[in-house]
Amino acid sequence: MSALLPVILAISLALVMAFATYRGIRRGGARFYTLEREAVLRRAMLTLALTVLLFLGAVGFLIYERQQFQTELAVQAGETVEGVPTATPTLSSVPPTATFTPTPDPDLPTPTATVRICRAVVRGTAGSGLNLRDTPGGTEVETLQEESILTLLEEAPIQQGGFTWVKVRTVALNEGWVALDFLFISDEECLSRVGQ
């Protein structure tokens, strides 16, 4: 909101100046002689030029703020932006894979490996989101926003309608099918699970 305050002030000042100029022309146009009318009109032209400059400054500021915001979003999404160093996000499986140590006591139970949890991130939708469907290519359940984190489920991928569909679970525990083309998976074992 604080970034919009200068824009709102500039536009308000420009509107007040334009209104005052209009009133000055209306009031002074009929009462004054020709030379005085010309002075009123010159003054009106000057204030209208200042009004236009205020509007242009406000629009330029908004465009600059939007570019800054888009650059920040691109950096957060991991895209390469000229002049801005990029940090590459890495996804890891949670919990980490257990490391086994030999137990000297045979009466102790042997630890078993935990099920590997594979994560994916919604990417490449150009901000329109990814549809979560009840079946591959079926009815839309919800729209997942860009950068949403999903858990890949054990079901085998299904080819249908030119897409590879994988079953996922959202953070809100909704389950459904999404197109694999719009998922980013960094873990090699998880990639092999979906056939990539």
Image (cartoon, helix red, strand yellow):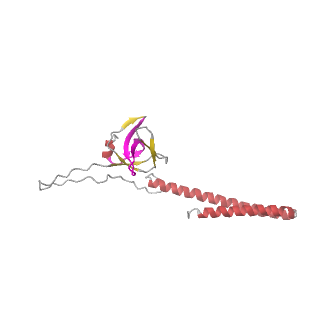
Query: What span is in magenta?
Result: 162-187
Snapshot quadrant of residue 60: bottom right
Most extreme residue toward the right, as rendered? Answer: 33
Q: Is 178 positioned to the left or the right of 59 in the image? A: left
Snapshot quadrant of residue 24: bottom right
Q: Nearer the viewer, residue 140 or 113?
A: 140
Quadrant assignment for the N terminus: bottom right
Q: Is 166 positioned to the left or the right of 67 in the image? A: left
Quadrant assignment for the C terminus: top left
Residue 112 in sight from this viewpoint: yes
At 51% across and 54% down in the image, what residue appears? 70
Q: Nearer the viewer, residue 48 or 133?
A: 133
Most extreme residue toward the top, as rendered? Answer: 161
- Tally of marks: 0
Expressed as whole percent of the image width and height from the top left, the position of residue 182 reads 42, 44
At 63% across and 60% down in the image, what residue appears? 57
Tell whether position 33 is magenta. Answer: no
Expressed as whole percent of the image width and height from the top left, the position of residue 80 reads 45, 52
Expressed as whole percent of the image width and height from the top left, the position of residue 26 reads 81, 61
Q: Nearer the viewer, residue 155 or 15?
A: 155
Residue 82 in sight from this viewpoint: no
At 59% across and 59% down in the image, what residue appears? 61
| 78 is higher (above) or lower (below) than 28 | above
